[in-house]
Amino acid sequence: MGMLFFFHQDWLVFPFFFFFLAIYLIGYSILFRNKNPKIRSEFSSCLISLFHGTPAAIFGAISIFSDPNSGFASLNTAFQKTVLDYSIAYFVTDLLHYVVFFPSDVLFIAHHIATLFVIVTCRHVVSHGAFSVVVLLVLAEVTSACQNTWTLTGACRKENRFAARVYHVLSPPFYVVYSIVRGFVGPYFVFRMVVFYASGLAYGLVPTWIWVSWAVVVFSAIGVSILWVYTRWVELISERRTGAKLEEKIR
């Protein structure tokens, strides 16, 4: 009876949390035990991100398309609630990672807290608007596998030729897709969301203070993402130009 209560719809966040915690500890204690402490923790964070990002994007998309009443003000379905709980568990686990190992990384800690605020209020406070939040989650996580591969190979590229080759080949297409999703698709969807909620069509379902806070959090996250990918583009172009100049000198 206790186990059935533990796996009840409203308590799924707990088994999901222990799932991510177990993966993190396996990565930290076994898979990456020969790395230095900083790399061990970063790689373990990437590992749980791999287990969260792509599944969340896939099941999030399925939960949206399987709901015939899907819309900005629609009632959260059981499937959507499960996707939200899965993401809550991941962000709590990764937040603990940053608090323990990188307490000075205020930007990431603030990002995780703000993201948790959006997901938790949607899941447990208003019980509506999962369409908006899950679509944003899908857009945020659709590049997750690629980004984690890029991060892992980037960290190893100086000591591993294969990792360096993968990082070199992967960077341009990853930056292109990331730029399109975070720079165009995401802002367009948030704009449509804001227009819908501002029109009053969700009055009595999603309070103004909640959808406004969602919009502020998401627009802030998009702004940081655009700045991040812009910096990566500048670095890439600079590296390629430097490499081209060195080749010309050798010739």
Image: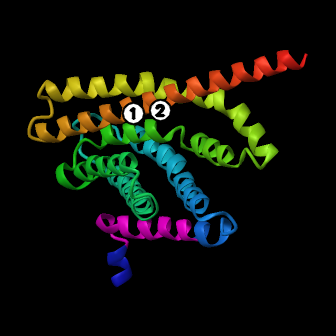
Judged from the image, the secondary structure of the residue bearing numbered disc 1 is helix
Q: Mark 1 is on which residue type?
A: Val
Q: Quadrant of residue 7?
A: bottom left
Residue that badge 2 annotates: 228
Contact check, label 2 and label 1, Cβ < 8 Å: yes
* 20 to 158, vertically: above or below: below
Membership of 178 in magenta stretch: no
Q: Which residues are magenta?
A: 7-25
The amino acid sitting under disc 2 is Trp
Q: List the residue tagged with mark 1.
A: 224
Can residue 232 be seen here? The reply is yes
Magenta stretch encompasses residue 24 = yes
Residue 22: x, y in percent?
52, 71
Residue at mark 2 to residue at mark 1: CA–CA distance:
6 Å
Judge by depth and name the residue closer to the eye, 134 or 116: 116
Q: Is residue 84 left or right of residue 160?
A: left
Colour mapping: rainbow
Q: What kind of element bears circle 2?
A: helix
